[in-house]
Amino acid sequence: MKVLVPVKRVIDYNVKVRVKADGAGVDLANVKMSMNPFDEIAVEEAIRLKEAGKVDEVVVVSIGVEKAQETLRTALAMGADSAILVVATDDVHNDIEPLAVAKILKKIVEKEEPGIVICGKQAIDNDLNATGQMLSALLGWSQATFASELSIEGDKAIVTREVDGGLQTIKVNLPSVVTVDLRLNEPRYASLPNIMKAKKKPLDVVNAEDLGVDVSPRLKIKNTGEPEARAAGIKVGSVDELFEKLKEMGAV
Amino acid sequence: MAVLILAELNGNQLSEDATAKAVSAAKELGEVHVLCASSDCSGAAQSAAKLSGVAKVLCIDSGVFGNGMAEPIADLVVSISDDYEHIIAPATNSAKNILPRVAALLDVMVITDITAVVNFNTFERPIYAGNAIQTVESSDQKLGSFLLFLSGWKIKSQRQTDQS
């Protein structure tokens, strides 16, 4: 069985986000970019499944700018077998929406025929949390979101999900789309020999147009601004005073 | 046109706080209908009917929906979506599991974690883990499906009138 892992190139999670003064978005020029942390967890899980003999092949796919090749090479260095890059834009500021991404992934799934798709639950740039669910819907597959544990037994996957106020364990029929949460695993670092080896692994490049998918956005971004700064706190002298203040604010 | 709200259910009980917040935000967009789908959920439907601003409650009592699984609930929402322009849910994990699936089946984009309603198709939402606030306008003709941030939502037009 093959596993497909979509990965996204996003601003590195350590980088402080700078909002452009003209409201046109977040400055991504000359900023360190990395693999979306949730996707890294998905890649790690896929590699662990391969090491456990549950799957035979790990294919990673990225959709976006040509530079996403670097992100795919990182996944290959971690242990993925091959990579596909779908070039959908030439401007890094042009975010491809989850609906378009899901449509492209559907085409890739039809070609690669994986038994399971493992993806990050959300990207840390647009925070939309939608691609996995949308892909599952378009394919008519089962879905298991926010996984904190995953095991494959025959033609079923057993997934522990992080739900509101607890955990839910479900069994889904394969093929399935699984989206992963932070607690699933801790991704490995790629070793130098593996980074060298990754350069020789196969990486196909295709264009989104060639797949026949319209990637034009449905959402128009009117403005991007800084969040309102938090007001400074105040000190109160006694419980009574605290109660008064809370009353004034209408909190009690 | 009416707005459909996916009630937040905890088992077969209504999570009143989350659902009520979604209702009060959605009131500005149209007549509010609430969907309760679970097993043995008539109690939840009764509670939903008591929320201020709810015009109609759709109660679908079936074991199929009992575990809150996304696949059957998404199909159900799609089947009644013709009557609605907006489909809204509180931004909980269970709704985040379901609504993007609904959106993909209807070929519309989902807008998650809305913190403010600017007008019927324009919303504010945080990106980059809250380090920036984006104002987005949906160009989907027929239908949008949205998730509302649980706390701190506000209706912008109303807030502006309050200040003037």
Image: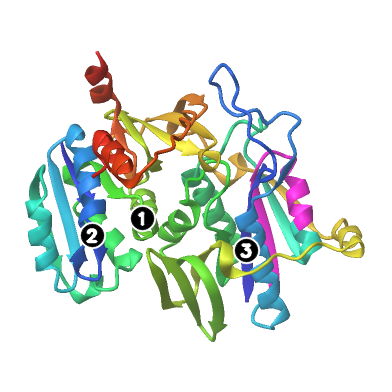
Queried whether the magenta region covers residue A101, the answer comes back as no
Q: Nearer the viewer, mark 2 or mark 3?
A: 2
Q: What's the coloring here?
A: rainbow
Q: Amino acid at mark 3?
A: Ala
B28 to B149, vertically: above or below: above
B83 to B77, vertically: above or below: above
Give the number of callouts: 3
Residue position for label 2 = B15
- Same chain for the residues under marks 1 and 3 in the image: no
Contact (Cβ within 8 Å) of mark 1 with mark 3: no
Queried whether the magenta region covers residue A57, the answer comes back as yes
Q: Amino acid at mark 1?
A: Thr
Quadrant where the N terminus of chain B sits is: top left
Q: Position of residue A92 (x, y in %)?
A: 66, 33
Q: Marks 1/2: CA distance?
A: 11 Å
A42 to B159, vertically: above or below: below
Residue position for label 1 = B92
The residues colored magenta run A56-74
Q: Marks 2/3: CA distance?
A: 32 Å
Q: Quadrant of residue B68?
A: bottom left
Instruction: Output the chain of dot 1.
Output: B
Instruction: Output the chain of dot 3.
Output: A
Residue position for label 3 = A42
A63 to A188, vertically: above or below: above
Q: Quadrant of residue A21?
A: top right
Classify mark 3: residues with Cα within 10 Å, few (<14), some (14-19) or many (20+).
many
Q: Marks 1/3: CA distance?
A: 22 Å
Q: Position of residue A119 (x, y in %)?
A: 57, 60
Q: Is residue A11 left or right of residue B102?
A: right
Contact (Cβ within 8 Å) of mark 1 with mark 2: yes
Classify mark 2: residues with Cα within 10 Å, few (<14), some (14-19) or many (20+).
some
